[in-house]
Image: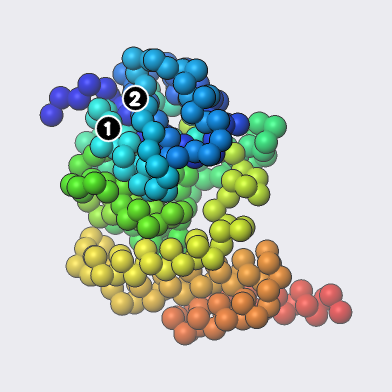
Amino acid sequence: MSWEYRVSFLMPVYGGEDYVADAIESVLEQSFDSVELVIVNDGSPDDSEAVIEQYLPHQDITYVSQENRGVTAATSTAITLANGEYLGVHPQDDQSLPGRLKRQVEILDEHPDVGLVYSPAEFVDLQGEVFTTWGDWQGPGKIDASEFFTDLYVDGMSIASPSVLFRRDHLPEGPHPWGDPDLRVVSDWEHWLDAAQHYDAVYEMDAPVVRMLRDDEHANLGRRSDIVFAEEKTVLRRMRWRYPNGDPPVTRRRYARAMSNHSLRELRFRLYDQGDFVAGARAGLRTALYNPLNVDLYREFASATGSMLRGR
């Protein structure tokens, strides 16, 4: 199939009046010529539309507004409108670094077995200052997709989604190509897991291609922790139902390991971030029930016990 653009960026917008201009400009300033930006205003209650309209009309920007349906549904809308060969989801409050697309398109062109390419991300504060780089998990180069799936499934979300550029081949037909619109937070994780079952390999870059805004209002956990943990459990169960014979298969043992590790992550959050000992203890019990041999649980218990004794 012949595409009008090599790349389409998909930008769902909701309440983004303070950040969306920087995100748009980071796309328009890319040195790569053939890039489209599809912006979906998902019923923003602020002045996001007025900010976006400053860039319109523009021959490489498609803009639509819809009633609020959530970020997953807005991303699906953008996919249905996109005219690019390769796709990337570009959050309203993150920025693409210069030269990003040239490098990523070259990788996908040179490696037809690679379904998606991603990189570490620079985390910035509200003043735009970089305070850490998150990523560099396995080192640059191709990674077997089955290995990528296992790591992502068993150990949880571990890639910077705004850095990903991906092919279309795995996208399902119908009105929800980005996935279940009821998933409000972790639809990207489910999507990368599905993609890993479809392709032979993924590619990890060594240097960041995005800057991600991170503060109390721009993180998955925090006030949304109950939603995040519930949605993650939903995704883990779906993978078990969806890929019992996949590559790799989601066996009962792999599912138990994943659920145990998920409960351990919740234990750490409830105990250390929220100071909720009861909720942390419940999560610890689930960790052991799913996988009594989870050595990380016992290490966590020993560490927490040692800290309590030293604090006396």
Q: Is residue 128 depicted above or below 150 in this figure?
A: above
User: Viewed as shown, does residue 24 lie left or right of 219?
Assistant: left
Q: Is residue 205 visible?
A: no
- Secondary structure under the numbered disc 2 in the rendered image: strand
Q: Is residue 226 visible?
A: yes
State left or right for residue 283 relative to residue 7.
right
- Report which quarter residue 214 is drawn in: top right
Which residue, as the protein is rendered here, is positioned at the far right? Answer: 312
Give percent across and percent down for residue 274. Answer: 68, 67
Where residue 4 sits, quadrant-wise, is top left
> Which percent across, then down, holds residue 165?
35, 36
Q: Quadrant of the N terminus?
A: top left
Q: Is residue 199 left or right of residue 186?
A: left
Instruction: Identify the residue under disc 2.
Output: 62
Which mark identifies residue 81?
1
Q: Amino acid at mark 1?
A: Leu
Q: Which mark is residue 190?
A: none
Q: Residue at x 65, y 80 (%)?
A: 278
Q: Are marks 1 and 2 in contact (CB under 8 Å)?
A: yes
Q: Could you tell me how far apart the alpha carbons at marks 1 and 2 are, in whole angstroms?
A: 8 Å
Image position, residue 234 (x, y; %)? 38, 67
